[in-house]
Amino acid sequence: MVWKFDRNEYIEDPGIPGRWMARSHHDYQREGSTTGYYAPGMEPKTDSGNTLVLAHRNARNPKISDKQLLDDVILEVDWDGDIVWEWHCNEHFDEMGFREGPKNTLARDPNYRQTQPEGMGDWMHINSMSVLGPNKWHDAGDERFHPDNIIVDGREANIIFIISKATGKIVWKLGPDYDNSPEAKAIGWIIGQHHCHMVPRGLPGEGNILIFDNGGWGGYDVPNPGSPTGVKAALRDHSRVLEIDPVTMKIVWQYTPTEAGFLAPMDCNRFYSPFISGMQRLPNGNTAILIWENKTYDEALAKGRDPKDKALSRNGMPAPGQGPDGQPLQGIWPDAILEVTPKGEIAWEWHVWDNIGTGPDQIDINWHLPLSMGYFARADWTHWNSISSTARPRRSSGAMATPPPTAWARLLPATTTTAIRCFSARTTWNGCPTATFPSSTTAHIAPAPTAAPSWKSIPPPIRWSGSTKPRITTVSIPTSSQRPRNSPTATGSSPPPTTGIFSKSPRTSRWSGNTTIPSPPTIRPIA
């Protein structure tokens, strides 16, 4: 351990020795990096520097409610563990622009939780916080975007704002209402959002603000049919990833169910992550997105979920097919990572669901009891809430001098999941065998680092995708002296090609072909 911080509050509970605690939650940022993910010239300090910590303190503010509040605070902590600057959310309530109806709702119910010895209201629930860093807006003279200023988002209030580091005041905001200006109306209601941050300098889209707009439920308003208490008053059953120009307040890029190819409104909830999630801008201009997936009760059982698990099972429930809160049982939510191009095409994807099994590098579907949320019985199984890639552009050489323009291939090595190799239009790796995509695209497949390039060192799943939907993409498997004679086959809408070739449509998942990879491994179509 090279650094720690715990001196936010001294806690004394009955029967337990008192101790200092950080009460940190959700986010922190180390000096040197504005977002925690790769950007040119930005490296978080590891042996010095200050750290911004998002933490909790209990508070009371009669302007908000007569109930105790679980308040969010931002602490700047130096290398010695001393707090050198702090900001308290409840002290800036008047600057947030709540209307009278939401104020009345907050006074009655500030997202109240029955804790002991006294309940408290998680009224704002800030879940991300980062400094802006150098940016073109401040270079042009706009002090709202001073590099030291801090951008945060409050999930329960549907609000995003920038704090002046010098004064502590809110100098820019979006929300909590989205019907009070033409720009806000064009953006539409942002609900329950996560991971709001400014794209760092040196990356495509620098200076714009990325937001994972979860949808689901969030915000305060007057009681209505969708929210009888007025808490979590805004509702939407799909998610969006938004890139917003903070000066013009216009959307400059987005990924929504429409871009994902889902029919509105019937299939919009196929891109839906009401909790967690996030995104980051990659050096190649693509955006990595962390998202939930919808898996049913029966799918979970087919994957090996224990039917006696009370967070999932029909056994021991209040009624057949119901969860502990009386709602219909709906299975579980595993996580997935998508890399999406500026055109909205999926260049690469990784799914927890594809890596569930019993091997040493697989994820046990019964590894812990999932959390059943209070609004429904779906199990929040893995709850990934951040994504960060440190991938940097690399110079190509040798046999890999022509990387795929928009196609990736990846594989999970047999030895460890940390050895995943990915290839984009600007990233190549040396020393790997290749599989060839026709029509000038090439995918590079890396075996486990300690294994010789052979069929035995290339286990499934191998996944591939093309640049245009519903274009058919084909992967050709080179011959090998270790290739066994057995050749499992699968057919779809396309005519079967020659031995060793698979074809599929990324959109329809219809594919055809024949593989010579040893059994039991199989090539799987993209879900």
Image (cartoon, grey):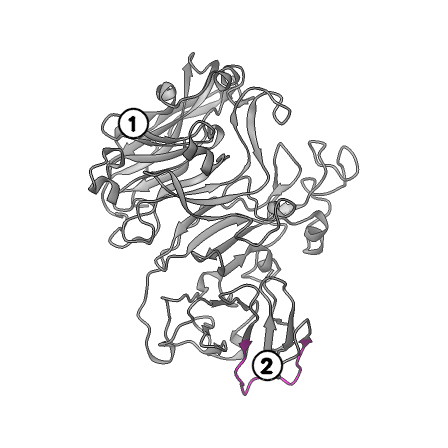
Q: Mark 1 points at which residue?
A: 86
- In front: label 1 or label 2: 2
Q: Which of marks 1 and 2 is nearer the N terminus?
A: 1
Q: Mark 2 points at which residue?
A: 500
**Is residue 228 something one can see in this rendering?**
yes
Residue ranking furthest to the right = 320
Say which quarter of the image contains residue 64. Answer: top left
Could you tell me which residue is drawn at 27 percent across and 49 percent down?
A: 201
Q: Give the range drawn in magenta.
A: 475-489
**Labelled pair 1, 2 in contact (Cβ < 8 Å):** no
Q: Where is residue 246 in the image (x, y as percent from the top left)?
A: 34, 39
Which amino acid type is shown beneath numbered disc 1? Glu
Q: Is residue 508 left or right of residue 314?
A: left
Taking the magenta stretch, the answer to whether it contains residue 388 is: no
Q: Which of 497 and 470 is in front in this view?
A: 470
Q: Position of residue 445 (x, y in %)?
A: 47, 72
Secondary structure, mark 2, is loop
Residue ranking furthest to the front = 182
Identify the image quadrant of the C terminus.
bottom right
Q: Is residue 81 above or below residue 253?
A: above
Secondary structure, mark 1, is strand
Q: Residues within 10 Å of mark 1 (few under 14, many from 20)?
A: some
Taking the magenta stretch, the answer to whether it contains residue 488 is: yes
Q: Where is residue 134 in the image (x, y as percent from the top left)?
A: 24, 44
